[in-house]
Image: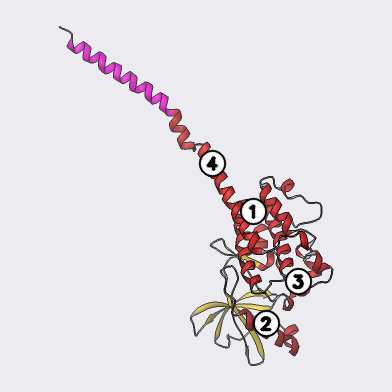
Amino acid sequence: MADAIAHYKILEPLGSGGLGEVYRARDTRLGRTVAVKVLPPAVTQDPARIQALLDTTATLTELSHANIAMLFESGRDGDQPFLVFEFVQGQPLASLINGRPLNVRRALEFAINLADALADTHALEMIHGDIRPETIMITPKDRAKFMNFGLSRFTAGGSTRLTSSVPYVSPEELAGKPADAQSDIYSLGAVLFEMLTGRQRARGLVLSAINPAVPAELEQIVGRMLAANVESRARSAASIGAELRSIAAILDTRTEASEAASPSESTRHRAERKPIGTIVLVILVLAALGALAAWMLPA
């Protein structure tokens, strides 16, 4: 790899992604760190495919959301097309789960982040199309961000989605229909199921049986997100976000009530010491009174 591509100074390789080799780079014009993706031959050698990609990215550069890694630019350096994204520090959700359920409240917060992103993008008639733990990044501030938003048909993960990502693929996609907002909701439901259980969703798995800490209200909404029949599925990401916030508020209230009902260790210790302290005080007072009485008696 050259030391630079266009006005981006290459700093270090970050690995291979769905859109080719990824590098951390410095934007020498704006002075910011970015992620530069150098597109692979599978894309660049097909003129129609590369033109479709550039047309798509021209729309995506206008998309700005706190829970989506922003696409800053698409361009060419000579014959080499490239994409420039916001550089997102953190770890993929897949490695964070790693076969273990997340804390319920934390998983709920991540789901709220992602539902908010989908609500805004679906309103603009944009979809992600490849939602799974590998395409979600968790930042150092513990926020969830979608990666490669809207580019699934150009990525390796998107092209093999129906064979390698079945747990996250909606029934209508498996039946040959194109991905849409409803399939994004199904995929997010599958990701939320995995966050809460540490397992990929499969037929016969009951969420609360795997993780009894999941409240009934949350299990119900996950069930609606994963409904096989589109007509029975949760209708919009905006409504999902609102329901998840209500559940979060309920959990927070329950936690506060539980903490109020159960005094802290230090409070209990103080309460346990109080009777002893009172006894000592009484003894000291009696001793003082006895000494005073003795002093007042005539010699």
Q: State whether residue 136 is above or below residue 25.
A: above
Measure how far apart labels 1 and 4 are at the Cα level: 22 Å
> Position of 182 compared to 91: left or right?
right
Q: Which comes sooner in the sequence, label 3 or label 1?
A: 1
Label 1: which secondary element: loop
Measure how far apart labels 3 and 1 are at the Cα level: 28 Å
Q: Amino acid at mark 3?
A: Ala
Label 3: which secondary element: loop
Residue at image position (63%, 67%) is 119
Magenta stretch: give its range: 273-299
Q: Nearer the viewer, residue 172 or 54?
A: 172
* Residue receiving disc 2: 56
Measure how far apart labels 3 and 4 are at the Cα level: 43 Å
Residue at image position (81%, 51%) is 204
Locate the C terminus by quadrant.
top left
Q: Residue 263, percent across and down?
A: 49, 36
Disc 2 and disc 4 in contact, CB within 8 angstroms: no
* Residue receiving disc 3: 179
The residue mark sitting in front, 2 or 1, is: 2
Q: Amino acid at mark 4?
A: Ala
Quarter location, residue 22: bottom right
* Residue receiving disc 4: 257
Measure how far apart labels 2 and 3 are at the Cα level: 16 Å
Q: Residue furthest left?
A: 299
Locate the N terminus by quadrant.
bottom right
Disc 2 and disc 1 in contact, CB within 8 angstroms: no
Disc 1 and disc 4 in contact, CB within 8 angstroms: no
Q: Amino acid at mark 1?
A: Leu
Q: Which comes sooner in the sequence, label 2 or label 3?
A: 2
The 10 Å Cα crowd at callout 2, few under 14, some 14 to 19, many 20 or more, is: some
The 10 Å Cα crowd at callout 1, few under 14, some 14 to 19, many 20 or more, is: some
* Residue receiving disc 1: 102
